[in-house]
Image: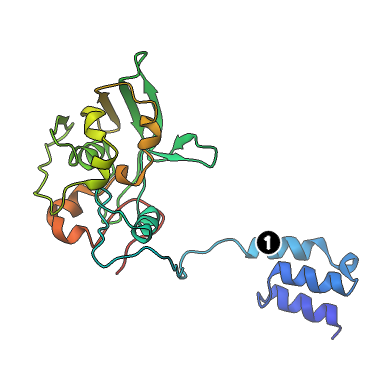
Amino acid sequence: MSKLKELEKLLTEGKITRRAFIARVSAMGLMAAVSPVLLNGKAEAATPKKGGRVILGSAGGSTTDSMDPGTLSQTMSQTVNQCLRSQLVEVNYKGEAVPELAESWEASKDAVTWTFKLRKGVKFHDGTPFNADAVVFSIGRMMKDRNVKFFGKPLEVPVQERPPEYWVSMEMDDTIGAIEAVDDYTVVFKLKRVEAPFLANMGMDFADIISPTAFTQNPKEFIRNPVGTGPFKFSK
């Protein structure tokens, strides 16, 4: 078997990457002899598959830190939290707010009323449906004076183990005056003042949307067993 054929066999069997294949064949001066179909086929075979393991190492962790968005403060917990949960918006590399759990939003002319239209068909990792009441619960539970209104049955906020330090540090009680779920997929925020970074703030860690079911069942344990709608699900 020629060296080229041997490398092609390794590539089609997935024993070497396409990048490694190209590097080796190019070094041999045989790239012109490689069929484009072979490379395209490998790209198709390399489509991401469900499963696998990601190992993450990070500084800034503490055994006393919390996985509650309202109280987490360490780099490690923030990094993990971003894998597990989602916010209404996400801030991209340009510093612009783009849709995440909210499909769209609109501000009033005076910029103190913000209306968010939410994505449909989303569920938390524990199976709880994501809706406007979940948003009201997640953000409203951190308010000092809870001026909130649910669309469905009102959700009681259990006593929390720690005050929402992250929320407080962002002075959000001075910004948000009321939150209302108008229907299952529409949430309205009434601000106390015009706040230029309000939309971007809704993409920060403290604004993560959590499962009301998981939190109300055991708020103390929730800080160690986070439940969200993000791309990864917490195991242990």
Exactly how many numbered labels are in the figure? 1
Seen from this angle, which residue lies furthest bottom?
A: 1
Q: Residue at x 37, y 13 (%)?
A: 109
| Vertical order, 228 against 181 (above or below) | below
Of all residues shown, which one is farthest toward the top?
Answer: 109
* For residue 178, side relative to residue 90 (left or right): left
Horizontal arrangement in the rendering, residue 224 relative to residue 110 (left or right):
left
Q: At 55% across and 61% down in the image, what residue appears?
A: 48
Residue 93 position (above or below residue 41): above
- Three-letter code, disc 1: Ala
Q: Is residue 220 above or below residue 181?
A: below
Q: Nearer the viewer, residue 41 or 190?
A: 190
Q: Quadrant of the N terminus?
A: bottom right
Quarter assignment of residue 112: top left
Quadrant hosting residue 43: bottom right
Residue drawn at 8 percent across, 49 percent down: 159
Residue ID for mark 1: 43
What's the image's color scheme? rainbow
Is the residue marked by circle 1 packed among few (<14), some (14-19), or many (20+) residues within 10 Å? few
At mark 1, the secondary structure is helix
Q: Is residue 185 visible?
A: yes
Name the residue: 27% across, 27% down.
189
Residue 166: percent from left, percent from top: 27, 46
Instruction: Pick the quarter of the image with the C terminus.
Output: bottom left
Residue 182 makes an appearance in the image? no
How far from the left and from the top, in percent, is residue 187? 28, 30
Residue 99, position in %: x, y? 44, 36
Q: Quadrant of residue 217?
A: bottom left
Nearer-the-camera pick, 32 or 58: 58
Q: Position of residue 75 (x, y in %)?
A: 38, 58
